[in-house]
Image (cartoon, rainbow, N blue to C red):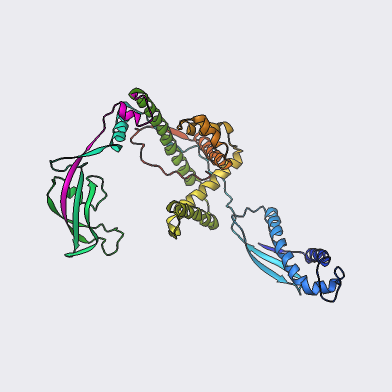
Amino acid sequence: MTVDLEPERIDAEVDKRLREFSRSVRVPGFRPGKVPMKVLRQRYGGQMRREVFGELVQTSFSEAVAEEELRPAGPPRIEADMDESARRYAYTAVFEVLPRFELSPLEDKTIRQPVAEVTEADLDTMLTRLRRQQRTWSAVGRPAQVGDRLKISYSGTLDGEPFEGGSAEDIQIELGVGRMLPGFEEGLVGAQAGDERRLDLSFPDQYPSEHLKGKPVAFVVQVSEVAEPMLPELDADFVKGFGFPDGDLDKFRLDLRRNMERELKERIHARVKEQVMDLLLETNRIDIPESLIRKEIEVFKQRVRRDVGGGGFELPDNLFRDQAGRRVALGLIIGEIIKINGIEVDPERVREAVQDLASTYENPQQAVDYFYTDRDRVASMEALTLENQVVDWVLERIRVVDEPATFEGLSAPVTSAVTTA
C-alpha cells in the first residue's frame, strides 16, 4: 500500500515544533528566544522533518488501513520515499492482511460422541494402579518374569570392540517396561540371580547416535538379583496415605470414583472438542498469513525454552509449523464465529469452570477466591469458556452420534488445538 503525505501538513508541523523549540534552544551569537526561524530551519529543520515524517507514517498507516477496510496481520515493513527538494513525502507499507472468508455450512456434518461410565472394574483397575505406585520389591530365587526388577551389570561390543555407553555396573531394570534396547529385556526373561547371558541385538535404524543406528551389537549381562513386586494391602493404612486419616476404605473408593467420573467427563469433552476443531478446519480452508505462523512458532519455542530452563536450547521452526498453523487457522475461524454470531463469554459458565477446578482442592472456596484475585487467570478461563461455547454452537448445528466407549479406552491423551486459551 502506497501512501502520499501532504507537504503542507508536514511543513505546518515542522514550523510549529521549531517555534516551540526556539524558546529554549541556545545558538551562539543569539540571545535565548531570539534565534531567527531561518537559522533554526537551516540547523534543525531536516532532523525535525524526518521526525515528523516518521510519526505521520504511523498515524497515516492506521488511517489508511481503516479507510481501505483492511485488517493487518502484523506490523508493516515501511519503505520510505522522501525527497525534501521535490517536496515528496510518501512511503510504501508492505504487510499481510487477515484473510476474508465466509464460514461454510455445517448442517450436514456428523461427529461421534463417546458414551461411557466408570464401572467397578475400572475402579478396581485404578486401585491396583495406585497400589503399584507404592509397591516394594522382594528378592526371589526363581527365574525372572515380566514385571520383575533385575539388578544387572553388562558390557557391550560393536564389531568386537567396546563402545561408549555400552557398559554399566549394578543398575536396576524392570522387565517389560521397554526402557532398554529392543530385545534386551526380553532376553533376560527366565534368568536367575548368578546367571550370565549373551544378547545379540541391533540398534534401531532411528537411533539418535549416527555411528550406532542399525548396527549389530553383543551384550554380556550378569544378573545379580531378581526381585518381584509386592503390592501394599488395600487396607486402612493404605487409605490413610491418600488423605483419609480415619482409614475409611468406602469413603476412599467413593472419592476415587468421583475423581474418575470427573476425569471421564473431561476425556469425553476433549474427544468431542477435537472432532469439532477438525471439522472447522476441514470445512473452512483459509490462507494463513505467514507472519502469524511465525509469531505462533515463537510462542511454542518460548514455551520449550521455559520448560527446559533456557540454556541456549533451541529447536528448528519446522518442528512447530504444523501445530502453529493449526492454532492460527482455528483462532481465525473461531474468531469469525464469535463475531458473526455475537457470542459473548458467559460469566456463570466461567464460575462453574472455576468451581469445578477448585473442587479438587482441600478448601474449594479458598481456591475459588484465590483464582479470582489474578486477572490473568480469570482471562485465561474466560477464553477457554468462550471457546467451549463455540464448540456448543457447532454441536447445535451438526449431527452427534453416540458411540459406546470405556474409561480405559478413553485414556489415551488427546492434543486438542486450544486457540484462545
Q: Over which residues does the magenta segment extend?
A: 220-248
Front residue (pair 199, 373): 373
Front residue (pair 176, 108): 176
State the image coordinates of residue 279 (x, y, percent, origin top left): 47, 42
Can residue 285 be spotted in the picture?
Answer: no
Magenta region includes residue 245: yes
Residue at image coords 30%, 35%? 129
Q: How many marks?
A: 0
State the image coordinates of residue 157 (x, y, percent, origin top left): 18, 62
Is 337 left or right of 260, judged from the image as shown?
Answer: right
Q: Quadrant of residue 133?
A: top left
Magenta region includes residue 342: no
Residue at image coords 61%, 58%? 75
Is 265 left or right of 15, judged from the image as shown?
Answer: left
Q: Quadrant of residue 46?
A: bottom right
- When the figure is inspected, residue 420 is found, relative to residue 362, above or below; the finding is below
Q: Quadrant of residue 4?
A: bottom right
Residue at image coords 58%, 38%? 373
Residue at image coords 24%, 58%? 203
